[in-house]
Image (spheres, grey):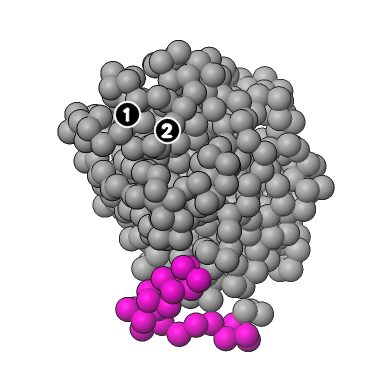
Amino acid sequence: MKLRQLALAATVAAAGLSSALLPSLANAQDKDQFFPVLVYRTGAYAPNGIPFANGYVDYLKLVNARGGINGVKLSFEECETGYATDRGVECYERLKGKGATVFQPLSTGITFALTEKAPNDKIPLITAGYGRSESQDGGVFKWNFPLAGTYWVAGDVIVQDIAKKLGGADKLKGKHIALVYHDSPFGKEAIPILQERASMHGFKLTLLPVTHPGVEQKSTWLQIRQQRPDYVVNWGWGVMNSTLIKEAQATGYPRDKIYGVWWAGAEPDVKDVGEGAKGYNAITMQHGAEPNADFVKEVLQKVHGKGQGTGPKDEVGQVLYVRGAMSAMLAVEGVRRAQERFGKGKVMTGEQVRWGLENLDLTQAKLDALGFKGVMRPISTSCQDHMGANWARIHTWDGKKWGFSSDWYQADEMIIKPMVKAAADKYAAEKKLQRRTPADCQS
């Protein structure tokens, strides 16, 4: 933003205008709501990171085309992390002083690192569909918002769908499920919920870690070929996903017995395999590919139609593009909600946006008005619940495109809530944190 002010000053000076005009013109630039955009357009995960980033930025552009947030225009700046935690922290440190009021780390590893920093800087973290699953507990994690779903929601619903296909949860007893997971904080998030479900239902769970970036899986699939588990759950990202499907094909393991997490169920994961991936399932974070969504049509008209699209036009509406747009929408609506309390048409601070995110009430009518009809279900947060929704669906690759293959599922809160509280209490004890008081919940 300083660069923009310097450029503006130079323009004014060149025009011979009075220097008395400079403060008001410069201050006008400060009336933007600034959104830092952490991306990874390079490195091993770029094929998946790029469409997410394009969807995120295009949605911010769409909000500006709509007139901003109650008249407040948005500005943004990308910072390349390469999916590396240290680079993500560097991006955070560089951008937080530019008026950042919300960060989306787009990496569970970066989220773990920033969870320590956000409370001091008073900047909320949105980790929609990733991050620490226990951060659903707003009583301990005041600044973390895993909106719309955590990895424990994902793992729970995958087991529910397997149980349904088998004819009931009692049929899980004696079955064998293998978890092939990215050996990182992201991949390890899946383990507690699957272990809990395995203990409940009596199925065997085999844990098979895969080293970053995931291109070497020969030994993993040798074990799968020898053990022949009934189902494989793929907790992968980037090139790991297409590699896994190709190894399954080479091994002769049926693709319809494989379930991916929602970061393993997009076009880049299957397009190079095509028909060979047919039958492969993945959980969705509510949405799938949404080429007919109202907001997608609006982006094509108001952003791409004006020559301002961030990426290729044909990816608009694809799975990860929609995920990026949805994530941006959640951040924007946190600001909008904050304005309802602290002043419409004003730029919000990090603390104000945190309140907005903790008091989100995205009804179906509001979502429909934003262009997300049929894409999402309502999200409603509170002091204690920073997730706000626990709905998911399964979609399946038919060889050419993704299509929903299940109705809506809801994660079992009877299982997840005690896990969340126990993990949050453990974190609070380790960090010597006190749970928030009722008074703090009102502030």
Q: Is residue 20 above or below residue 257?
A: below
Where's residue 308, x and y in %? 59, 25
**What is the CA distance from the residue labelled 2 to the residue labelled 1?**
10 Å
**Among the 4 quarters of the image, the one containing residue 402:** top right
**Among the 4 quarters of the image, the one containing residue 442:** bottom right
Q: Secondary structure at mark 2?
A: strand
Q: Nearer the viewer, residue 24 or 105?
A: 105
Marked residue nearer the N-terminal end (2 or 1): 1
Judge depth for marks 2 and 1 and give the one in front: 2
**Among the 4 quarters of the image, the one containing residue 226:** top left
Where's residue 267, x and y in %? 48, 24
Identify the mark at residue 258; answer none if there is no mark. 2
Q: Nearer the viewer, residue 57 or 283?
A: 283
Magenta part of the chain: 418-440
Q: Is residue 402 magenta?
A: no
- Residue at x-position 46% and y-position 68%: 419
Task: Say what amino acid the circle numbered 2 marks.
Answer: Ile
Would residue 36 appear left or right of 384 to someone viewing this image? Answer: left
- Residue at x-position 54% and y-position 27%: 396
Determine crowd level at label 2: few under 14, some 14-19, many 20+ residues with C-alpha closer than 10 A: many
Q: Are marks 2 and 1 in contact (CB under 8 Å)?
A: yes
Q: Nearer the viewer, residue 291 or 261?
A: 261
Identify the mark at residue 244; answer none if there is no mark. 1
Q: Secondary structure at mark 1?
A: helix
Q: Is residue 104 visible?
A: no
Where's residue 70, x and y in %? 75, 51
Q: Is residue 298 above or below residue 138?
A: above
